[in-house]
Image: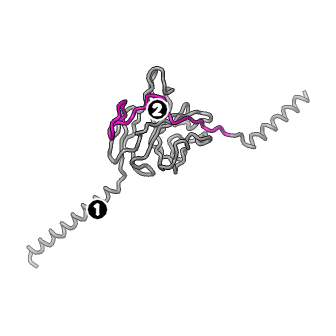
Amino acid sequence: MSSVKYQQKGKTKMKKIIIIAIVTLGLMMQNLPASVTFTGTAMVSPTGNPLGLSAGQVGVWLNKDATATSWNVLLAANAINFGQVLNSSVTYNTDLFTVMGTTTVTGTSSFSLTGAIANLDLLNGISAADQYAVMVFNTSTVSSGTVAGDTYKLWRATDWLIPSDGATISYSITPEAGAKYQQIRTADLLLGSGTVAIPEPSSASLLALGVAGLAAVRIRRKS
């Protein structure tokens, strides 16, 4: 085989390898999780505090994974139990809602909550066009988890939908299709309120209280 033919064959083989590598890379890129970004202030409660916010409150951003699921599921009695981790999807029924992130209310006379979520992956139940909302707890924190008897409010504007792959969304008083979402400033966008379940006393605790009561009665009689 002449050197010229050998070189041509080598070039053809190299071209095939390059084409295969490009196609493979393209397929790998398609399989990478898509992501979106939310920026700006999602909630503003001006002077007079119509939203009832206070500094330090935690807002948990939740994606509704199933179209048929109602947001009222989160407001039902005993839906949120005490001692649960705020930023874990399990707290909110992992089959129905996915935690996208948490942010904290700031301010003094006027209060605000940012919607800052960067590079949110569209996977694990999160898809474009899904509804999302923010649940604001009164006293529960990320470090302590849900506090028994604590109250929470669920907020959502009608255009709060997961955008398409690669999009960046901000919040504004004047929303724009595909660019700016509705900023919550009035109480009419409140979906509802709920209360963290209070633990029932266990049988062991009741028995211990009963024994302690009997002991106290005996001591009192002897004295």
Give the SS element for disc 1. helix
Q: Residue 64 or 34: which is nearer the viewer?
A: 64
Q: Residue 17 or 166: which is nearer the viewer?
A: 166
Task: Name the residue tied to disc 2.
Answer: 104
Residue stretch rendered in magenta on the structure: 170-199
Position of residue 77 measured from the top left corner of the image (x, y, whole percent): 62, 40
Label 2 vs 1, first from the N-terminus: 1
Say which residue appears at 47% left-offset and 33% top-offset. 189
Q: Residue 222 or 49: which is nearer the viewer?
A: 49
Give the SS element for disc 2. strand
Above or below, comparing residue 2 to residue 157 in the picture: below
Residue 8's quadrant in the figure? bottom left
Residue at the extreme bottom: 1
The numbered mark at residue 135 is none
Task: Name the residue tied to disc 1.
Answer: 24
Label 2 is placed on what type of residue?
Answer: Thr
Position of residue 208 measured from the top left corner of the image (x, y, whole percent): 78, 39
Q: Quarter of the image for the N terminus: give it.
A: bottom left
